[in-house]
Image (spheres, rainbow, N blue to C red):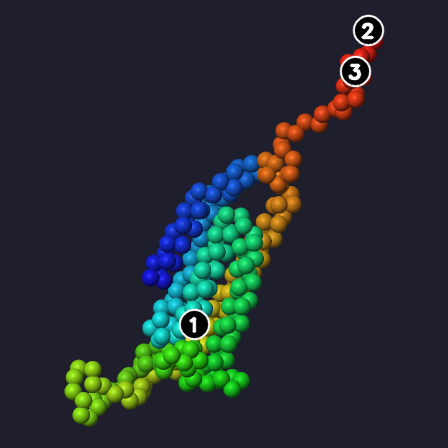
Amino acid sequence: MVLCFISWMTMHVTTAVNYSPATYAGSFMRGDHSHVSGASQPMRQGNALQLAALERQVFDFLGYQWAPILANFLHIIIVILGLFGTIQYRPRYVVVYAIWTAMWVTWNIFIICFYLEVGGLSKDSELLTFNISQHQSWWSENGPGCVRKEASMAGIKGLDSHSYISVIGCALEYRYIEVMHSSVQILVALVGFVYACYVVSVFTEEEDSFDFIGGFDPFPLYHVNEKPTNLLCKQTYLPA
């Protein structure tokens, strides 16, 4: 359901790229036709951010990590909002994304501290699951090289009569995988923050230097300065 909603939002943003009158009209009036080839650049960057967030979301879903799931979902929505603002010339949306990236970096730093058990945090606590369940990261049992050992419980019959014992042979401990995931998210967020600041600066410069057919001018384009009525009356009664 969540993935369908995200796909729906992405489709509408993609449609906005093809039917943005302000983008095409503004570029045409400036004599700049580079929007035909440059319009896909925000989409490429936005898709990269979405793919990174979706990859994180999938593995958090598999591990029932409810706090990261909610954070990832909100992150994806803000990424779509920032992408929409970039395409539709909405600087405020881009500013919202830039502010969110700072919060997103802070969240990922917290995740790193959580798994490295910094500041009294414990990776074995149920903090990320809101104390609803005792699930841990999906990578704790499915990491590279990990082998799960299970044994049947005595006195219980059935296909699901297993008792999880231990995981051995992991080439890399799961907490380091989570730390790498968060580190990648931080790097991607920093790149997105720099790009958002650049987009806002470009929009600001264009607003200061370009008059979009009177769109930024409180007076209409074809405003005619009329002469004062008293001068017109004097001209009317001039002697022959």
Q: Which of labels 3 and 1 is toward the front?
A: 3
Q: Which residue is mark 1?
A: 68
In the image, taking residue 60 as reference, residue 121 lies left or right, namely: right
Q: Which of labels 2 and 1 is toward the front?
A: 2
Q: Amino acid at mark 2?
A: Ala
Residue at image point 58% right, 53% down: 200
Residue at image point 53% right, 64% down: 100
Q: Which residue is mark 3?
A: 235
Residue at image point 61% right, 45% down: 206
Q: Which residue is mark 2?
A: 240
Residue at image point 59% right, 35% down: 213
Q: State whether residue 81 is above or below residue 173.
A: above
Q: Secondary structure at mark 1?
A: helix
Q: Secondary structure at mark 3?
A: helix
Label 2 neighbourhood size at 10 Å, few (<14), some (14-19), many (20+)? few
Q: Nearer the viewer, residue 94 or 199?
A: 94
Q: Position of residue 127 (x, y in %)?
A: 44, 80
